[in-house]
Amino acid sequence: MTQKKTTSTATESAPVQFVFGKSNYRIMLISIAVVALGFILMIGDTDIYDFRKIILAPIVVLIGFGIGFFAILKKRK
């Protein structure tokens, strides 16, 4: 029987590098808030064909998704 030596590299490892920077995460949180605002604009007991529900809310949701897309593609500094 042979035993393999295992070495622990936990003490020698480099610091953890995240995929996105701090600004990317902030922009992503803003985009989630904008999308949530768009969905909140869609709810209510008013007329189903109200301007707010069929025009404004979908535009706000799409803007939120666009902000999220930008947050993902933005390069770190």
Image: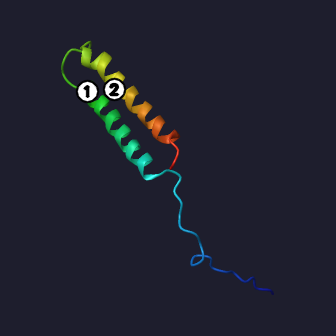
45 in relation to 28, above or below: above
Report the residue that reaches farthest toward the left: 46
- Local packing at callout 1 (Cα closer than 10 Å; few below 14, some 14-19, many 20+) is some
Residue at horizontal 21 percent and vertical 14 percent from the top: 47
Mark toward the viewer: 2 or 1: 2
Q: Which residue occupies the foreground of this view, 58 or 30?
A: 30
Report the residue that reaches farthest toward the front: 77
Report the residue that reaches farthest toward the top: 49
Say which mark, if any, is on residue 41. Answer: 1
* Element type where label 2 sits in the image: helix
Say whether marks 2 and 1 touch (CB < 8 Å): yes
Residue at horizontal 31 percent and vertical 16 percent from the top: 54
How far from the left and from the top, in percent, is residue 60? 33, 26
Q: Which residue occupies the foreground of this view, 13 or 49?
A: 13
Left or right of 54 on screen, residue 13: right
Q: Which residue occupies the foreground of this view, 52 or 3?
A: 52
Give, as a three-letter code, the residue at label 2.
Val
- Local packing at callout 2 (Cα closer than 10 Å; few below 14, some 14-19, many 20+) is some
How far from the left and from the top, in percent, is residue 41? 26, 27
Residue at horizontal 32 percent and vertical 39 percent from the top: 33
How far from the left and from the top, in percent, is residue 53? 28, 19
Q: Quadrant of residue 28?
A: top left
* Element type where label 1 sits in the image: helix
Q: Quadrant of residue 40?
A: top left
Residue at horizontal 67 percent and vertical 81 percent from the top: 7
Give, as a three-letter code, the residue at label 1.
Leu
Residue, disc 2: 60
What is the quadrant of the N terminus in the image? Answer: bottom right
Left or right of 49 on screen, residue 68: right
The colour scheme used here is rainbow
